[in-house]
Amino acid sequence: MKVFFLLSLAGSCLGIAGIIAWAVRIKSIFTRPFVKLSCFTVFVIVMYALTLCPFIKSVGLLTAGLYFAGLDWLLFLFFNYIFFFIQDTRYLKPSRFFKKFYIAVSAADTFSLILNAFLQHAFTITPVFDSKSVFYCWQYHFGFLYRCHLVYCYLIIIHLIFFLVVRSRLSSSFYRMKYAKILFSFVFLVLLNGIFILFKWDLDVSLLVYVFMDIGVFILTFFSIPHHIERGMRISVAQQTESCFVCYDFNGGILYMNDKARKVLKDRADIRDKISEYQKQFILSYGTASHYYTWQYEFENHGNLEIYNFDFNVITDKKGSIIGSYLHFSDMTEEINTIRIQQYNATHDHLTGLCNRQTFFEKAHEILIENPVQHYLLIATDIENFKLINDLFGWETGNEILIQQSLLLCGTDCPGCVTGKISGDKFAILIKKDDFDPECAVERCRKIKLNQKDVDYKIKTYLGVYEIKNHYENVQNMFDKAVLAIRKIHGDYEQTVVYYDDSFMDELVHAQNILNEFSLAIENEEFQVYLQAQFDKESRLRGCEALTRWNHPQRGLLSPSDFVAPLEESGLIYRLDSFIWEKAAQILEQWKKDGIDWYISVNISPKDFYYIDVIARFRNLLAVYDFDPSKLNVEITESFIMNRDGLEMEVIKGLKALGLCIELDDFGSGYSSLKTLEDFDFDVMKLDMEFLSECDDGPKAKSIVLSIIRMAKAMGIRIVTEGVEYREQFDYLCEAGVDLFQGYYFSSPLCVEDFRKKYAGL
Ligand code: C2E
Ligand code: CA
Ligand code: CA
């Protein structure tokens, strides 16, 4: 019997060794605690087996003592193992106190039981012999201290049973199954152990119970509960992921967190607090519509902004009832910043940081739709000759101007207002009508300067203002209208702000029609020269100015105010001017043949100089037609002098060299002074009656005009006044010293035939 029992113990040990090897192969998180538990089981079995082998009382006492002490530790390990196995510390935590208590008592008991080999205070042994008087086993005689040991063992058992009962009662059905299985297995083993003890067999057969226990634990841990394998796998997946992972039970108690989460939460109280705040909100949402919540929060960490994403998910059982939740959170700073930068770049202008075209239109539209009763203005800005700034000073300087412009616009950035860079040098602002102060805007525009080599160049900015009547109108249209308004004042240095008017659109359509029809009209010779006579003080005809008329087949006779501006804007004016100059040359040739001594003044648009070589054109006319160059006067406007960069002097010299007479048209309408007249060596100064009328106001103004006339004359410059309508004007101007007169008082412009008939009688 004894041999059989010993063999079965040896077999058990081998079996447990096999199980250990198996568990090691499985490589689960339970492997380590399970191996510990199994090794102790083997230790207990070996100790008991040793008590049976040698017939030496002291060895028997020592091994029996170690066997009993081993039971203490085995139960303690089992206790710990169950906690680890369940990994649910929601209701009953194995407090440090219990752990320490069990370790202390087990250590004391172990000490006492080892000491028992010498003192025999806990138990003593007497040998039992079989029928052949061979040592069979020991009989135990227990003292008080051994009973204490027994009580202690049962205390651990009761504690464990109590824990398992309470735990399985409180938990959801999902967990209950798990705890019930462990509980029943455990109770079964305890009962089996009790039965073996009751039978009071000489050999401690109850030892086999520990073997069963070990096998049971092995099966329960690694095979019986697939959830745990699955969970183990999930946990190792959770460990390996880059993000932080925390599992909660139903009430929000932490069941598990991966190392990464532990690391982050350990030093970051701010993140911990935020999570518990979010978690409370999430738990409150249980049973409501969403089983998934996601939050994003920006933390400040040592001056750096960190953005974290928090995703809370509910975990449900098969029936769909909630058994817990998990949180998945990660530091998204880099990703979000990259996305933000990409978004910013896609929606903003790189140079100025203002909204780009698309974004401006979208934002403006949103604001308008959201504020249907608020009055808004859409303002477009344009920089005069920006292309020229770029060409002359380079892109970098151009960019500097654009940045200045954008700062100017940001300055107008009041709440509910949006600014954007629409294209090249064109910006746009959507602003509440009440927030826009035109005077202040003009003042700001004046501040934009270009400093080159210590010289400040003023940059002219125009503001086109479109008052929004219909908030649903396409914002691009609004912008186009504001830009259209700017076209109205382009080149006018006095004006900065212009309000869009519906007539602008009609004019635009009209201008477009002019341009469409122009080429054919030139080919068909629809343009005609009209001549307006110029007289001297004695009312003798001296010459005339050539003025264009368009004999339009449908619209009748059109005056230059109908078509000169669009032609100048588009640059096509040079074709018309060249045509008129040639006509004037032909007339002069004819007059020369006829012995007529009059001169003709022709107009030159400042734009002509951009498109053609004006001097070459006149040289060519002189080569082709036979007329005296001093009979051809050219009228140049002040804007030509103001716009050019040093070349105007060369141009005027070139024209003079051809023998032409050079006139400064519309003197006084711009910035030109007597100094200009002198510098550029003009032959004639043309004063507009309108300018003179403006000076009619008082004796002081009058004396200024008189002194200008006097000084011009002193410089040898002849003076022509145009727009003379009344006799009084003529008398006054005669007295003032004006040489030549042109105006309705004498004659309106006439076609060439009428002019000849009227003045030459031919
Ligand atoms: P401008 O060179 O100052 O021409 C004088 C304008 O005054 C002419 O208008 C003439 O008809 C008008 N006028 C003449 N006498 C009087 C008067 O007593 N009272 C008033 N209020 N006006 C008078 P028009 O012919 O309509 O020409 C207007 C402008 O068109 C011209 O102003 C000139 O700048 C431009 N223009 C005319 N023909 C040509 C051309 O062939 N080429 C270019 N580039 N411009 C031209
Ligand atoms: Ca003129
Ligand atoms: Ca004029």
Image (cartoon, helix red, strand yellow):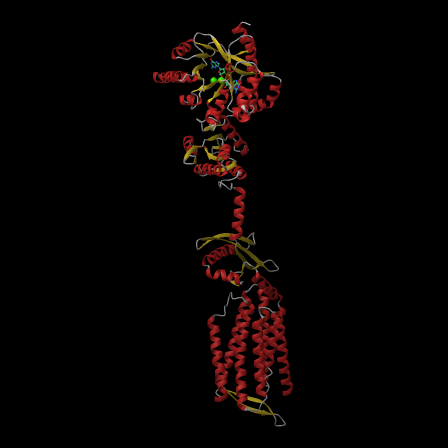
Is residue 712 shown left or right of residue 63? Answer: left
| Quarter occupied by residue 494 | top left
- The foreground one among 166 and 424 is 424
Residue 66 pos. (x, y %): 53, 83
- The foreground one among 289 and 667 is 667
**What residue is shown at x 44% (from left), y 53% (from top)?**
303
**What residue is shown at x 52% (from left), y 50% (from top)?**
336
The answer to whether one can see residue 140 in this image is no
Q: Is residue 349 above or below residue 198?
A: above
Residue 262 pos. (x, y %): 50, 62
Q: Name the quarter where the N terminus is drawn.
A: bottom right
Residue 182 pos. (x, y %): 58, 71
Q: Name the quarter where the C terminus is drawn.
A: top right
- The foreground one among 259 and 645 is 645
Q: Is residue 339 above or below residue 58?
A: above
Is residue 485 shown left or right of residue 25? Answer: left
Q: Is residue 309 above or below residue 398?
A: below
